[in-house]
Image: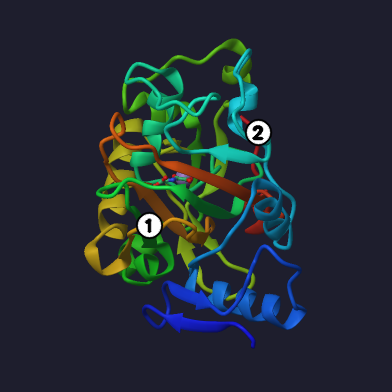
Amino acid sequence: MSVTVHSVTPEFVAEVGDVDLARPLDPADLAAIRAAFTRHAVLVFPDQHFDDDSQLDFARHFGPLETTVFKARQGHKLRLHENMADVGNLDAENRILDTSDRQRLYNLGNRLWHTDSSFKRLPAYCSMLHARSIPPIGGQTEFADMRAAYDALPEATKRRIAGLVAEHSIMHSRAKLGFADFDAGEREAFKPVPQVLVRRLPDSGRLSLYIASHIGAIRGMADDEANKLVEELTAHATQRQFVHSHRWRVNDLVIWDDRCTMHRGMDFDDQRYARDMRRATVSDVAPTCEQMGMAVAAE
Ligand code: OGA
Ligand code: MN
């Protein structure tokens, strides 16, 4: 039996059944999954029984994998494979992270609207998050459709933001939460990088906003004006009509297109419940300015 795709809305989010992603994939199934992904930008695959290796193997069908940002930190003990982003609330011994734990405070940045790795020169194409354990209440993940949000902008705003370049750094999003505990290696690795504010997706041809809490500046614009613009665009793009909230079940795999969505994790009682969530992330093909045919100076 081949994959079944069930749309949540015609253009955003679909559920996909009748496929076991931990086993070698039929090329026709992979093609159907990729077509659904181009259209819907977020796909939910229930009941996927992955270990870390099979999750990473599935992700490799979409391109080369990223390495976790925790590797930039001197002395950080990884719980998972270095290609896996550890976004749960457990330490290397699988104990719940204490409220004052650095990794917990760092991961609180995932509660702000963002897209993954826009702070890397070569950002993410897509993310694949698997739920190994979940809290019984809270801890949903929300997704916003940045293509629909772009389409709905007033024409004057579209003209105003065309061609703008923003500076993204993970230190900017963490600073919004008062977190600044970065060592010298991290400060070097997390220097701001330029990304376009509006991008065209080569596969669907659609235009999309490309914003995140990682933005700290817009080139050629005063900081107060830039902050206000990013705040307004974020408020616009995360209105209810553009947002889907995912309530996790154990063994859900959710994959999202980082080029044209934002997401955020919702609050839960993280001192009471374990939430073991593991993310494989696929790199995009080129920096966004390059993809939009713009020559941009490094600093
Ligand atoms: C992520 C992320 C939010 C969540 O995995 O990139 O931001 O709900 N996760 O865990
Ligand atoms: Mn994320």
Disc on res. 153: none
Graded by Cα atoms within 10 Å as few (under 14), some (14 to 19) or many (20 or more), the crowding at tag 1 reads: many
Please name which of the two marks, 1 or 2, marks the residue nearer to the observer. 1
Ligand 2 lies under 8 Å from the Cβ of mark 2 = no
Name the disc covering residue 298, or none: 2
Residue flagged by tag 2: what amino acid is it?
A: Ala
Q: Which colour scheme is used?
A: rainbow
Q: Residue at x 62, y 34 (%)?
A: 80
Residue at (59%, 19%) from the top-left corner?
Answer: 186
> Horizontal placement of 278 versus 15: left or right?
right
Ligand 1 shows up in the quarter that is top left
Residue that carries the numbered disc 1 in the rendered image: 248
> Mark 1 and mark 2: span between their CA atoms?
40 Å
In the image as oriented, which residue stretches furthest toward the bottom?
1
Q: Residue at x 34, y 41 (%)?
A: 112
> Which secondary structure, mark 2?
loop
The residue lying toward the viewer, choosing from 181 and 88, is 88
Left or right: residue 189 versus residue 271 is right
Task: Write the residue at 61% across / 20% down.
Answer: 77
Relative to 116, 13 lies left or right: left
Question: Looking at the figure, which quarter contains the N terminus?
Answer: bottom right
Q: Which of 169 and 194 is in front in this view?
A: 169
Mark closer to the chain start, 1 or 2: 1
Quadrant where the C terminus sits is top right
**Kind of residue at disc 1:** Trp
Residue 262: image quadrant is bottom left
